[in-house]
Image (cartoon, coloured by chain):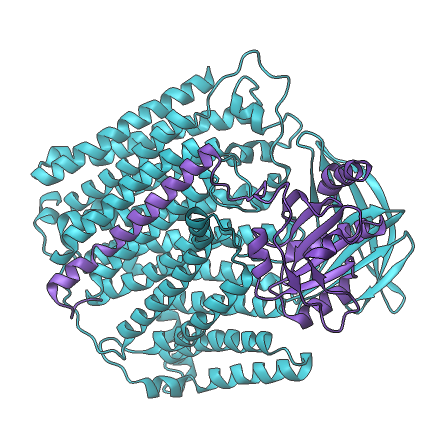
Amino acid sequence: MIPELGHFALILAALLALAQSVLPLVGAQRGDIRLMGSAAPLALAGFLAIAIGFGALIWSYATNDTTVANVVANSHSAKPMIYKISGTWGNHEGSMVLWVMVLAICSAAVAGFGRGLPSALQARVIAVLGTISLGFLAFILFTSNPFERVWPPAPDGNGLNPLLQDFGLAVHPPLLYTGYVGFAVTFAFAVAALIEGRVDAAWGRWVRPWALAAWSFLTCGIALGSWWAYYELGWGGYWFWDPVENASLLPWLAGTALVHSAIVVEKREALKIWTVLLALLTFALSLLGTFLVRSGILNSVHSFASDPTRGVFILCLLAIYIAGAFLLFAWRAPAMAPTGIFAPVSREGALVLNNLLICSICAVVLVGTLYPLFLDLLTGQMISVGPPFFNSAAGPLALPLIAGMAIGPMMSWKRAALWPVLQRLWWAACLALAAFLLTLAFVGWHVLPAFGFACAFWLIGGAAADIADRSGLGRTRLANVFHRARGLPRSAWGAAIAHAGMGVTLLGIAGMGLATEHLAALRPGGSTSFAGYEWRLDGVRDVTGPNFTARRATLTLLRDGREVRVMEPSRRFFPQGRTTTTEAAIHTNLARDLYAVLGEEHDGQAVIRLHDNPLAPWIWLGAFIMALGGALSLSDRRMRIAAPAPKRREAEVTA
Amino acid sequence: MTDIAKPSRRKLMLYAPLAVAGVAGVGFWAMLRGLGDGSFNPRGVPSALLGKNPPEFSLPGLDGIDLPPLSSPDLRLFSKPVIVNFWASWCMPCIVEHPQLIALQRRGVPILGISYKDREADARTFLARHGNPFARLGVDAPGRVAIDWGVYGVPESYVLDRHGVIRWRWAGPITPEVMTESIVPLLRSLESA
């Protein structure tokens, strides 16, 4: 009964989405206020319908309803409740329902919070969101219905992919999808602006919070995914340039560029066409990622149920949305004339440089990810593009970007001088140089990590210099400085914190550049020395979990003969899926991670792999600091208070 | 961005995103069709070389490591099934599969290594740190041999019978499960054949 209710709710949502994509658009074209007014209620009703559908699916999972095919394929009664619920979106069908759920929340938010928007713009934005929602609801209903029944009911489910039975991965998809789907809103704003043929500062002010929010969520989502790969795959690395990872990095890069170029639109009414294009591109890359992962085209360590027929459907959706938007762009963009004029050396100029560099990195990652596919298609030749390509191609582009990240925010709008800015940054440069030399002196000849530390301190120092400069440090009394620092706009703090967060991440990456690892085959009682500790294997024993059996090793760490710590890496075997996962034991004190993995056992010997990863946690900590900066910027007064009303006829009509 | 360009050329530029998206779309459509009828397989398994001799090659050895170099005739040298393993020191999954390679070597399986796009010093450090499972080792710094074999990425392993014919291919790390469920039974059947 409940699954049918969910199914009907999704069908109803699809019909509502159809109305939502047509009525407000027609209303906006004709200037019909009643039709435009239907946008918000339709969006809210669609949200309710999808929420019922999503709730019904969660209910089926929570009660382990084995008459639902999706539950049978992906769940099991022995799973802990939290993973039963997170299993709802741990599979293809459920994750698509989560996708439209987030989209519906966004539409409802535009309907609810967008009252200050000109009503024609709001109607068009909601209509575009309705079109996207319609496409994906149709995709769910026609190709991946999560409420399919089986009869007779299966005795029990077949278990979820055991790799996914993990807290990090329970939270990772919702964050990632919120990021992807948030960019659907900026996409909708861009399409609406193209239809209207007008982009102005007010438009920039409306788009930026959405871009910022989506970007912050995506940052968290990617960081969680990378953290998961670090502790769950047991390979001791944090980023593998895996195609699926790249698929999430692409919209992040484009979104980062968008967040920056939208500032220029908002403050200076320049870069309009470029910003619109970025908004389209960011969502196009989000959809591309969804398509590549779901269609089975990509070869990746991250598995997902894939099916070419679904791929065809998503490709058709992509063709409609992306090609449609780009066609509209080619047709309407010439109408948008730039008004703000700026010198090459200025804040705008720095942001253009930022955009060019980030987009180049994005292009490198895109080419590296897709080139093997296209080469295979055209010549039948298989090649692999590995980390060496990405590192050597993206590295040189990242360098000027990092250099500019500290300089750009301190430049003034319209026209700036480079020399005074560099003068205010001299001590950040000194800090970077000191970090470089100290690393070489204390760790030995590791040039790349030393360089990484230098970049990290340059960024953190640059962010501090920016705040100090804005608060007037050195130009006024200290008490006054604190007062001014408190009074700085939150967006200034947000930018500085996000840039410093990037520095913190770089700190972690540079630290991982100094990581060492050690492989030892030990008998119980045997020991090996590594990273300044004596590692003694006390034994390996069997452990039984709720739906797995495991081999768990007990390692005792000794320093100078004293027992310091016990670490217990294990290997889990899940009988339902006949799969094994490694559970690395990680001991962290924030300055370094000691990381132990239990390998194969042979002739009474257990292979133990040990890693010493200096500063590893800072990689993800930095990402969360970046997201925090985004959130702080989002809470800026300017974003909360409605824009100073631009002179618009529509605005008067709504008032 | 293109404010200064001539109006007509600028208009054409605005069609560029559409053109790129269109080309990509056609490509993806062809890939999906290929996936459907089996002519396009991104996982690259099974190999086009299955049941055939691999293309001729001759690779230099690794300086400073006491291992003979590797060329095509060496594949039949052992008159028993061998494993050819493409690896690199920069590849994390290679560390994961390394204990299994060592275990296979202890069982007396000749493992012929091909070091793929790696710096020689890094490769030496890798072997010194993790142990050497290889009976012979060739250095494929430009990755040419890997292209001829159709290697998708590292690690990738091939099982060849005693006549040097490719019998099995695995793109990805040899986990303990792959070893016990695929490689060991396969080697046993090839040895008895």
Q: Quadrant of residue A178?
A: top left
Q: Quadrant of residue A655?
A: top left
Residue in front for this viewpoint, A393 or A574: A393
Colour seen for chain A: cyan
Q: Image height check: is A479 above or below A217?
A: below
Indicate the position of residue B52 as horizontal and vertical percent values.
Answer: 63, 44
Which residue is at the far right?
A525
Residue A457 falls left or right of residue B19: right
Residue in front for this viewpoint, A288 or A164: A288
Indicate the position of residue A646 as horizontal and vertical percent values.
Answer: 13, 57
Residue in front for this viewpoint, A482 or A550: A550
Q: Image height check: is A312 above or below A6?
A: below
Indicate the position of residue A214 as horizontal and vertical percent values.
Answer: 38, 51
Total number of numbered discs in the rendering? 0
Rendered purple, the chain in question is B
Q: Image height check: is B193 above or below A643?
A: above
Residue B59 falls left or right of residue A494: right
Residue beneath the point at 42% across and 77% down: A403
Residue beneath the point at 64% across and 45% down: B170
Residue beneath the point at 27% across and 54% down: B17
Is residue A307 visible to the viewer in this orientation of the structure?
A: no
